[in-house]
Image (spheres, rainbow, N blue to C red):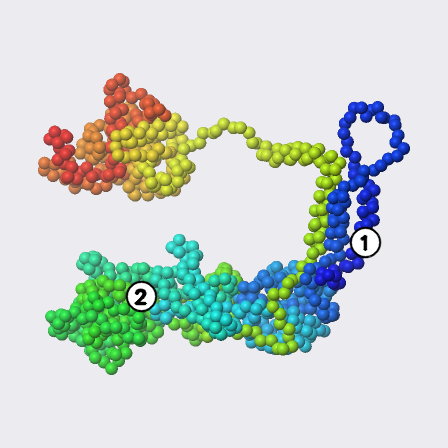
Amino acid sequence: MTMIAGIGFTAPWLLLGLLGLPLLWLLLRAIPPAPKRQAFPAVTLLLGLKDDESLSDRTPWWLLLLRFAAVAAAIIGLSGPVLNPAAEDGGGSGPVLIVMDASWGGAAGWKQTVAQARAQLEEAGRAERPAALLQLTAPEPLQFRAASGWQRQLAGLAPLPWQPGPEQLAQALEAINGVEGGFDTVWFSDGLDYADHGELIEALSRRGDIEVFEQPLPVLGLLPASYTGSAIALTAQRSRAGAAQEISVVAQGKDPGGTERSLASLPLRFADGARTATAELSLPAELRARLSRFEIRGANSAGAVALTDDSLRRREVALVSSQSADEGLALLSPMHYLRQALAPSAELLEGALADLLPANPDVIVLADVARLAPAQEEAVIEWVENGGLLLRFAGSRLAASDTARAGEEPLMPVRLRIGGRSIGGAMSWGEPKTLAPFGETSPFFGLESPGEVSVRSQVVAQPDPELADRVIAELADGTPLVTRKTLGQGQVVLFHVTANAEWSNLPLSGLFVSMLERLAVSSSAAAPKAEDLEGTTWTPLQVLDGFGRMEAAETLPGVAGPDLVAAPAGPQLRPGIYDSGRRMLARNVLRQGDELSAARWPASVAVSGYGAPQALPMGGVLLALALGLLALDVLGTLAVSGLLARARTAALAAAIGLSGLALPQDVQAQPLQPVEDSALDYLTAAGLASELVLAHVLTGDAQVDKVAAAGLRGLTDTLFLRTSVEPAAPVSIDLERDELAFFPLLYWPITRDQPLPSSEAYAKLNTYLRAGGMILFDTRDADLTASGATSPAARRLQQIALPLDIPPLEVVPADHVLTRAFYLLQAFPGRHGRGPVWVEAAPPDAEQAEGIPFRNLNDGVTPVVIGGNDWAAAWAVDSNGRPLLPVGRGYAGERQRELAYRFGVNLVMHVLTGNYKSDQVHVPALLDRLGQ
């Protein structure tokens, strides 16, 4: 490469073409532009004449300058100019090896690393030096070939979520030793030290020169989070000590909707010269249970992520009481207080102990349970020894039993005295006792003891040499209040008071919730050791990539339990979340006790940062500039010759023609096609839920559906004008695709050829009826059935109603609420006036009190109303509110229509208010209106 004025040229001899620009000037000056044509009739008089002397017009100077610039840009571009070329050091033309750590430590600056590696390969390509690439986190045999081939592969490289380990470094040394001859090395380091790093430097030094590129900023890492009993402890590290630095750690987790969000953030500050920063994060139990990971904001690497597992997540707590479910008042039950205290921070399981033990909960709470069956006691002991927490509360049953009287029992932390201690009892207090401050060794340390919390009664611990070590909370006079002992890997804890407010007001205080939370959290097992996981296999659920992003792990094999804890991360053990079937463990990049340290290089190795400007080839830019200038030259030539206007007109015409071809061939004015109405087509679910909407079922018969829609429109208008109900416009629904829950009343006209609903539609209909909806079936055949005949519509209704969950029916009795829900009615005519109307039959035991004209039916709404009076036809109105169909004759007919409207109003009122008219409070007013 030849340097000229600080710019390198790979083909400098092409610059000699610039010497030909003066000749180009003369040629262009001698050749005029095309003459401008102008139509002029008188020019025909000059035909045949010859001019002895002719002068050529000259090309405009600006057009000449444009052409000169285009040619010059093309010549310079073809000569291979390079901006900021690498300094020439006379290093020869031998092979060059590109070595990349490619670990998580370099993920934050991976783009810069790839850019620098590409620049090195381009430089090697210009010098015609063969190159090879060695990725230390995933080494492969070395292949020296043209540098351009490796440039294309750089885009597919990515950092991996582990550092080069002994196995990878052994493979790298084997690959280096498998190459004969010398080569220079360009090493892109992530800035972290690791085992056998010096041995690799020594092996490469024997082959040639080494140049190292390393990012100047220290690498940041985050150790696994741990729970200290009151807060989550977080520790961050940096690879090099330096000036004071503050970083932000973000707690990520899922919100109630399942979306991953930032739940909290915590600043961590590195002191001047320190490599470690620590802080504690206090979160409510509900948020702590949702945590999935902590990460250093902006670090974007797997080492800056600390995944969380079961140790910080929601516990399963089994509640077992000595009382039956229906014994005593709910608000006085110990279970009520425990539910209220634990529900926000734990998954609660309730039932018999024998049923709950197979679920293997994290905590079992026994509320005043004195004795367990021998088999259950053995099972609970085994469960506690395997890491469970047994939390017991005292009560009258425990105080009256002989549990732990004669000697210590496995499931009691201390021995108990006979009887108890209470105000006015055998071991009397003069007044209720308050709580003493919690000691430093207590899990409750740091919680404030409110002065208003007091104890009136308790079971008393028998003095014992080990009693002092087992007390974790006590009263002001030193009496143990909460005791605890270790059993295997688990614990047994006893509150010496009840779980309700019978013996103390502790369960009424916020302190009670905090104490339970501390105990539930502290019940989690410590980080397992390798020997604890012997013989287990863990399946990866999700793993981290080098940038700290989670990805699925379906194809990865299981990992042996001891390796999950003790083995270093690598291709066979990727950081992520692992599951054993009973527990989930997070394997992070960094483990407790790991330390980050900066890479150390010998004095003979040159170490550079990424700050130097990169070599930038300019050939492509200049050639593109030359093409642009030539395009401007074409436009300038057309403008000078007067052809630009015609070219612009032709281009406009071509654009219009192409746009016409681009239009769809079937685009034309078409009349609007009628579309079947559907509630969900034009109303959102929120709109339907906020309005009262009447609906009718589409039958497939256009005329019947039209009358049904018009009828509900008329009934809607009547309700709006006469009552406080203000319905929205009625809609038509398709049983197969529309949701029914938005509509309190469905009008279903029956036709002889109406198709039967599908099984899915019947399921929706039955759910709708059970949820309180009402269907008005109208066979519209009362004029036929009055004579005793059975119509086709009635037979079709029998087929349609067969799969429906319809209760026993009866003809509307005289005291049914439909007769008085809004209007007082004795008949329910529609377009036909004499058909019977069927509703749900009253209970057999419904009685009529003396002096009361109505039976006491103040429960339920009939799910179906069946009749054939063609109510929609009587209700139907046109767009102007005028009746659509005739009803009867003259005044009698209009009176019948009025009664039909009143029946519709009563029906809607019955749906909306139920049988409230049967309440006794309405009897005087109704009797007065009835004249009784």
Q: Is residue 309 left or right of residue 556?
A: left
Residue 351 lies in quadrant: bottom left
* Image coords of residue 823 (percent x, y): 21, 30
State the residue at coordinates (81%, 44%). Answer: 28
The residue lying toward the viewer, choosing from 15 and 617, is 15
Question: Which image quarter is the N terminus in?
Answer: bottom right
The residue lying toward the viewer, choosing from 499 and 780, is 499
The residue lying toward the viewer, choosing from 456 and 616, is 616
Identify which amino acid the numbered label 1 is placed on: Leu
Residue 407 lies in quadrant: bottom left
Label annotation for residue 19: 1
Q: Residue furthest bottom?
A: 465
- Distance, label 1 to label 2, CA atoms, is 87 Å
Question: Which image quarter is the C terminus in?
Answer: top left
Mark 2 burial class by Cα count in 10 Å: few <14, some 14-19, many 20+: many
* Image coords of residue 219 (percent x, y): 52, 69
Label annotation for residue 517: 2
Label annotation for residue 842: none
Residue 763 lies in quadrant: top left
Q: Nearer the viewer, mark 1 or mark 2?
A: 1
Mark 1 burial class by Cα count in 10 Å: few <14, some 14-19, many 20+: few
Identify the secondary structure beneath mark 2.
Answer: helix
